Image: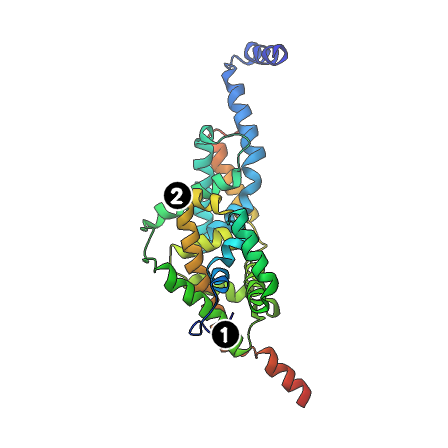
Amino acid sequence: VPFRIDVYFTHQLLTNVPYTHSASRERDVAFEREAIPWIDDVYRFALSLTRDESDADDVVQDTFLRAYRSWHTYLPGSDCRRWLFTICRNVFLRSRERARPTVELEAADVDAAAAGNVYSAAVREGYEDIFSRLDLAPAISDALDKVPEPFRSTLIIVDVEDQSYEAAAEILGVPIGTVRSRLFRGRRLMQEQLLAYAIDAGFGPRRALAEQRRNA
Amino acid sequence: MPETLQETISDECKDVLLHVWDYLDAQLTPDATDALRAHIAVCPPCLQYQEFQEEYMRAMRASRAKKGASWFLKARVLDELFDSGYAP
Protein backbone atom coordinates (compact mmCIF):
# COMPACT_ATOMS: atom_id res chain seq x y z
CA VAL A 1 0.00 0.00 0.00
CA PRO A 2 1.71 3.24 -1.12
CA PHE A 3 0.65 5.23 1.92
CA ARG A 4 2.17 2.71 4.26
CA ILE A 5 5.37 2.53 2.25
CA ASP A 6 5.62 6.31 2.39
CA VAL A 7 5.14 6.30 6.10
CA TYR A 8 7.74 3.61 6.60
CA PHE A 9 10.16 5.27 4.19
CA THR A 10 9.76 8.63 5.93
CA HIS A 11 10.20 6.94 9.26
CA GLN A 12 13.43 5.38 8.05
CA LEU A 13 14.70 8.69 6.66
CA LEU A 14 13.97 10.56 9.86
CA THR A 15 15.10 7.96 12.34
CA ASN A 16 17.66 5.93 10.40
CA VAL A 17 15.90 2.85 11.74
CA PRO A 18 15.14 0.23 9.08
CA TYR A 19 11.43 0.06 8.42
CA THR A 20 11.39 -3.64 9.19
CA HIS A 21 10.90 -2.28 12.69
CA SER A 22 7.48 -1.22 11.57
CA ALA A 23 6.66 -4.85 10.93
CA SER A 24 7.63 -5.68 14.47
CA ARG A 25 5.49 -2.78 15.63
CA GLU A 26 2.56 -4.31 13.77
CA ARG A 27 3.33 -7.58 15.51
CA ASP A 28 3.37 -5.83 18.87
CA VAL A 29 0.10 -4.08 18.18
CA ALA A 30 -1.46 -7.41 17.19
CA PHE A 31 -0.08 -9.01 20.35
CA GLU A 32 -1.48 -6.18 22.44
CA ARG A 33 -4.87 -6.48 20.75
CA GLU A 34 -5.22 -10.27 20.66
CA ALA A 35 -3.10 -11.76 23.45
CA ILE A 36 -2.88 -9.26 26.29
CA PRO A 37 -6.66 -9.08 26.91
CA TRP A 38 -6.63 -12.78 27.88
CA ILE A 39 -4.30 -12.28 30.83
CA ASP A 40 -7.11 -12.72 33.39
CA ASP A 41 -8.24 -15.97 31.79
CA VAL A 42 -4.68 -17.26 31.55
CA TYR A 43 -4.15 -16.33 35.19
CA ARG A 44 -7.24 -18.25 36.28
CA PHE A 45 -6.15 -21.24 34.24
CA ALA A 46 -2.62 -21.06 35.64
CA LEU A 47 -3.99 -20.77 39.17
CA SER A 48 -6.20 -23.80 38.66
CA LEU A 49 -3.14 -25.75 37.54
CA THR A 50 -0.68 -24.56 40.17
CA ARG A 51 -3.12 -24.02 43.07
CA ASP A 52 -0.69 -21.41 44.31
CA GLU A 53 -0.95 -17.69 43.50
CA SER A 54 2.77 -17.06 43.45
CA ASP A 55 3.42 -20.05 41.18
CA ALA A 56 0.53 -18.94 38.97
CA ASP A 57 2.11 -15.49 38.60
CA ASP A 58 5.35 -17.08 37.45
CA VAL A 59 3.55 -19.34 34.99
CA VAL A 60 1.57 -16.40 33.55
CA GLN A 61 4.68 -14.30 33.13
CA ASP A 62 6.51 -17.13 31.37
CA THR A 63 3.44 -17.87 29.25
CA PHE A 64 3.24 -14.33 27.89
CA LEU A 65 6.96 -14.13 27.28
CA ARG A 66 6.90 -17.38 25.33
CA ALA A 67 3.77 -16.30 23.50
CA TYR A 68 5.40 -13.02 22.51
CA ARG A 69 8.55 -14.71 21.30
CA SER A 70 6.61 -17.26 19.28
CA TRP A 71 3.91 -14.90 18.06
CA HIS A 72 4.87 -15.79 14.47
CA THR A 73 3.43 -19.27 15.09
CA TYR A 74 0.03 -17.86 16.04
CA LEU A 75 -2.46 -18.01 13.20
CA PRO A 76 -4.18 -14.60 12.96
CA GLY A 77 -7.89 -14.87 13.54
CA SER A 78 -7.67 -18.21 15.34
CA ASP A 79 -8.60 -18.75 18.99
CA CYS A 80 -5.92 -16.82 20.84
CA ARG A 81 -7.14 -17.90 24.28
CA ARG A 82 -6.80 -21.54 23.28
CA TRP A 83 -3.31 -20.87 21.96
CA LEU A 84 -2.32 -19.15 25.21
CA PHE A 85 -3.81 -21.95 27.32
CA THR A 86 -1.72 -24.46 25.37
CA ILE A 87 1.44 -22.49 26.10
CA CYS A 88 0.36 -22.03 29.71
CA ARG A 89 -0.12 -25.72 30.28
CA ASN A 90 3.22 -26.52 28.67
CA VAL A 91 4.92 -23.94 30.87
CA PHE A 92 3.24 -25.44 33.92
CA LEU A 93 4.24 -29.00 33.01
CA ARG A 94 7.79 -27.94 32.34
CA SER A 95 7.93 -26.10 35.65
CA ARG A 96 6.75 -29.16 37.52
CA GLU A 97 8.57 -31.68 35.32
CA ARG A 98 5.46 -33.75 35.74
CA ALA A 99 4.64 -36.73 33.59
CA ARG A 100 1.18 -36.26 32.17
CA PRO A 101 -0.84 -39.45 32.47
CA THR A 102 -0.68 -40.86 35.97
CA VAL A 103 -3.85 -42.92 36.17
CA GLU A 104 -4.87 -45.71 33.85
CA LEU A 105 -8.30 -45.45 32.31
CA GLU A 106 -10.85 -48.02 33.33
CA ALA A 107 -12.87 -49.97 30.85
CA ALA A 108 -15.77 -47.92 29.49
CA ASP A 109 -18.43 -50.27 30.88
CA VAL A 110 -16.99 -50.07 34.37
CA ASP A 111 -16.97 -46.28 34.13
CA ALA A 112 -20.53 -46.20 32.83
CA ALA A 113 -21.77 -48.25 35.75
CA ALA A 114 -19.83 -46.08 38.20
CA ALA A 115 -21.19 -42.88 36.68
CA GLY A 116 -24.72 -44.18 37.03
CA ASN A 117 -24.08 -45.30 40.57
CA VAL A 118 -23.17 -41.78 41.69
CA TYR A 119 -26.54 -40.57 40.47
CA SER A 120 -28.29 -43.56 42.03
CA ALA A 121 -26.62 -42.80 45.37
CA ALA A 122 -27.64 -39.14 45.12
CA VAL A 123 -31.28 -40.14 44.50
CA ARG A 124 -31.22 -42.71 47.28
CA GLU A 125 -29.85 -40.17 49.77
CA GLY A 126 -32.23 -37.43 48.64
CA TYR A 127 -29.53 -35.30 47.00
CA GLU A 128 -30.79 -35.47 43.43
CA ASP A 129 -30.94 -31.64 43.31
CA ILE A 130 -27.53 -31.18 44.89
CA PHE A 131 -26.11 -29.15 42.01
CA SER A 132 -28.96 -26.67 41.81
CA ARG A 133 -29.58 -26.29 45.53
CA LEU A 134 -26.17 -25.63 46.98
CA ASP A 135 -23.51 -23.04 46.38
CA LEU A 136 -20.85 -25.52 45.42
CA ALA A 137 -18.10 -23.14 44.30
CA PRO A 138 -15.86 -23.76 47.36
CA ALA A 139 -16.59 -27.48 47.29
CA ILE A 140 -15.85 -27.68 43.59
CA SER A 141 -12.48 -26.08 44.14
CA ASP A 142 -11.66 -28.57 46.91
CA ALA A 143 -12.99 -31.50 44.92
CA LEU A 144 -10.93 -30.55 41.86
CA ASP A 145 -7.83 -30.65 44.03
CA LYS A 146 -8.62 -34.26 44.85
CA VAL A 147 -9.15 -35.40 41.26
CA PRO A 148 -5.91 -36.86 39.87
CA GLU A 149 -4.25 -35.83 36.66
CA PRO A 150 -4.90 -36.05 33.77
CA PHE A 151 -8.60 -35.86 34.61
CA ARG A 152 -8.28 -32.65 36.60
CA SER A 153 -6.80 -30.57 33.77
CA THR A 154 -9.43 -31.84 31.37
CA LEU A 155 -12.23 -30.92 33.78
CA ILE A 156 -10.80 -27.45 34.30
CA ILE A 157 -10.53 -26.77 30.58
CA VAL A 158 -13.92 -28.15 29.52
CA ASP A 159 -16.21 -27.92 32.54
CA VAL A 160 -14.85 -24.83 34.31
CA GLU A 161 -13.34 -22.79 31.49
CA ASP A 162 -16.09 -23.90 29.10
CA GLN A 163 -13.76 -24.81 26.25
CA SER A 164 -14.73 -27.26 23.51
CA TYR A 165 -13.44 -30.84 23.28
CA GLU A 166 -11.40 -29.72 20.26
CA ALA A 167 -9.80 -26.90 22.24
CA ALA A 168 -9.06 -29.23 25.14
CA ALA A 169 -7.48 -31.75 22.77
CA GLU A 170 -5.25 -29.04 21.35
CA ILE A 171 -4.30 -27.61 24.74
CA LEU A 172 -3.56 -31.01 26.23
CA GLY A 173 -1.95 -32.44 23.10
CA VAL A 174 -4.18 -35.53 23.03
CA PRO A 175 -6.84 -36.89 20.65
CA ILE A 176 -10.46 -35.81 21.16
CA GLY A 177 -11.36 -39.37 22.14
CA THR A 178 -8.94 -39.12 25.04
CA VAL A 179 -10.56 -35.85 26.17
CA ARG A 180 -13.91 -37.60 26.09
CA SER A 181 -12.64 -40.58 28.12
CA ARG A 182 -11.00 -38.31 30.68
CA LEU A 183 -14.17 -36.27 31.06
CA PHE A 184 -16.22 -39.39 31.58
CA ARG A 185 -14.01 -40.57 34.40
CA GLY A 186 -13.26 -37.10 35.78
CA ARG A 187 -16.90 -36.06 36.01
CA ARG A 188 -17.76 -39.20 37.86
CA LEU A 189 -14.91 -38.58 40.31
CA MET A 190 -16.07 -34.97 40.78
CA GLN A 191 -19.64 -36.03 41.44
CA GLU A 192 -18.50 -38.59 43.98
CA GLN A 193 -16.51 -35.90 45.78
CA LEU A 194 -19.36 -33.37 45.69
CA LEU A 195 -21.93 -35.83 46.96
CA ALA A 196 -19.61 -36.79 49.83
CA TYR A 197 -19.09 -33.08 50.55
CA ALA A 198 -22.83 -32.41 50.73
CA ILE A 199 -23.36 -35.30 53.11
CA ASP A 200 -20.30 -34.51 55.27
CA ALA A 201 -21.11 -30.81 55.42
CA GLY A 202 -24.52 -31.57 56.81
CA PHE A 203 -26.55 -30.28 53.89
CA GLY A 204 -29.68 -32.24 54.58
CA PRO A 205 -31.49 -33.85 51.73
CA ARG A 206 -34.45 -31.87 50.46
CA ARG A 207 -36.90 -34.46 51.73
CA ALA A 208 -35.48 -34.22 55.27
CA LEU A 209 -35.57 -30.42 55.19
CA ALA A 210 -39.19 -30.46 54.08
CA GLU A 211 -40.04 -32.77 56.98
CA GLN A 212 -38.21 -30.50 59.42
CA ARG A 213 -40.22 -27.52 58.21
CA ARG A 214 -43.47 -29.43 58.52
CA ASN A 215 -42.62 -30.48 62.09
CA ALA A 216 -41.46 -27.01 63.13
CA MET B 1 -33.97 -45.71 34.46
CA PRO B 2 -34.00 -47.76 37.66
CA GLU B 3 -32.48 -46.45 40.84
CA THR B 4 -29.43 -48.70 40.69
CA LEU B 5 -27.65 -50.39 37.87
CA GLN B 6 -28.01 -53.75 39.51
CA GLU B 7 -31.52 -53.79 38.15
CA THR B 8 -32.18 -54.55 34.53
CA ILE B 9 -32.37 -51.48 32.35
CA SER B 10 -33.46 -51.04 28.78
CA ASP B 11 -30.95 -50.48 26.00
CA GLU B 12 -32.32 -46.97 25.52
CA CYS B 13 -31.78 -46.11 29.19
CA LYS B 14 -28.30 -47.58 29.02
CA ASP B 15 -27.55 -45.36 26.03
CA VAL B 16 -28.59 -42.33 28.07
CA LEU B 17 -26.36 -43.45 30.92
CA LEU B 18 -23.41 -43.94 28.60
CA HIS B 19 -23.86 -40.95 26.34
CA VAL B 20 -25.67 -38.20 28.21
CA TRP B 21 -22.48 -36.14 28.51
CA ASP B 22 -21.75 -36.56 24.80
CA TYR B 23 -25.34 -35.50 24.20
CA LEU B 24 -25.09 -32.39 26.39
CA ASP B 25 -21.69 -31.53 24.92
CA ALA B 26 -23.08 -31.85 21.38
CA GLN B 27 -20.62 -34.61 20.53
CA LEU B 28 -23.12 -37.09 19.10
CA THR B 29 -24.07 -37.54 15.47
CA PRO B 30 -27.43 -36.01 14.50
CA ASP B 31 -29.04 -39.47 14.37
CA ALA B 32 -27.73 -40.46 17.79
CA THR B 33 -28.79 -37.08 19.17
CA ASP B 34 -32.31 -37.54 17.83
CA ALA B 35 -32.54 -41.07 19.24
CA LEU B 36 -31.42 -39.97 22.70
CA ARG B 37 -33.69 -36.93 22.68
CA ALA B 38 -36.67 -39.05 21.64
CA HIS B 39 -36.09 -41.53 24.46
CA ILE B 40 -35.52 -38.85 27.10
CA ALA B 41 -38.78 -37.20 26.08
CA VAL B 42 -40.76 -40.32 27.03
CA CYS B 43 -38.69 -41.59 29.97
CA PRO B 44 -39.04 -39.43 33.11
CA PRO B 45 -36.15 -41.10 35.01
CA CYS B 46 -33.80 -40.46 32.07
CA LEU B 47 -35.04 -36.87 31.90
CA GLN B 48 -34.20 -36.47 35.60
CA TYR B 49 -30.78 -37.98 34.98
CA GLN B 50 -30.17 -35.54 32.13
CA GLU B 51 -31.27 -32.63 34.33
CA PHE B 52 -28.96 -33.84 37.10
CA GLN B 53 -26.02 -33.76 34.70
CA GLU B 54 -27.03 -30.37 33.29
CA GLU B 55 -27.09 -28.93 36.80
CA TYR B 56 -23.65 -30.39 37.44
CA MET B 57 -22.32 -28.66 34.33
CA ARG B 58 -23.93 -25.37 35.31
CA ALA B 59 -22.42 -25.60 38.80
CA MET B 60 -18.97 -26.28 37.35
CA ARG B 61 -19.14 -23.29 35.01
CA ALA B 62 -20.50 -21.07 37.78
CA SER B 63 -17.55 -22.01 39.98
CA ARG B 64 -15.12 -20.24 37.67
CA ALA B 65 -13.33 -17.71 39.80
CA LYS B 66 -14.24 -14.16 38.93
CA LYS B 67 -10.89 -12.78 39.86
CA GLY B 68 -8.15 -12.31 37.34
CA ALA B 69 -4.52 -11.33 37.33
CA SER B 70 -3.51 -8.66 39.85
CA TRP B 71 -2.39 -5.26 38.65
CA PHE B 72 1.03 -6.13 40.01
CA LEU B 73 1.20 -9.22 37.80
CA LYS B 74 -0.02 -7.30 34.76
CA ALA B 75 2.67 -4.67 35.31
CA ARG B 76 5.26 -7.41 35.82
CA VAL B 77 4.29 -9.16 32.58
CA LEU B 78 4.37 -5.90 30.64
CA ASP B 79 7.77 -5.05 32.12
CA GLU B 80 9.16 -8.37 30.98
CA LEU B 81 7.63 -7.90 27.53
CA PHE B 82 9.11 -4.42 27.23
CA ASP B 83 12.51 -5.87 28.13
CA SER B 84 12.02 -8.35 25.28
CA GLY B 85 11.39 -5.56 22.79
CA TYR B 86 7.62 -5.32 23.01
CA ALA B 87 6.57 -1.81 22.00
CA PRO B 88 2.98 -1.56 20.79
Left or right position of A196 against A127: left
Q: On the image, numbered disc 1 is attached to which residue?
A: B3
Left or right position of B12 against B44: left
Question: How many neighbours does mark 2 have within 10 angstroms: few (below 14), some (14-19), or many (20 or more)?
Answer: few
Q: Which mark is residue A62?
A: none
Q: Could you tell me the amino acid type at mark 1?
A: Glu
Q: Establish if A135 lies above or below A92.
A: below
Residue A169, horizontal then vertical, whole percent: 43, 45
Question: How many neighbours does mark 1 have within 10 angstroms: few (below 14), some (14-19), or many (20 or more)?
Answer: some
Q: Could you tell me the amino acid type at mark 2?
A: Gly
Residue at horizontal 54 percent and vertical 43 percent from the top: A39
Q: On the image, numbered disc 2 is attached to which residue?
A: A173
Q: Report in which chain the residue with disc 2 lies.
A: A
Q: Are marks 1 and 2 on the same chain?
A: no
Q: Establish if A44 lies above or below A82.
A: below
Residue A140, horizontal then vertical, whole percent: 51, 63
Q: Establish if A208 lies above or below B45.
A: below
Residue A166, horizontal then vertical, whole percent: 47, 43
Q: Secondary structure at mark 2?
A: loop
Q: CA distance from mark 1 to mark 2?
A: 38 Å
Seen from the viewer's position, the closer of residues B35 and A164 is: B35
Which image quadrant for residue A32?
A: top right
Q: Report in which chain the residue with disc 1 lies.
A: B
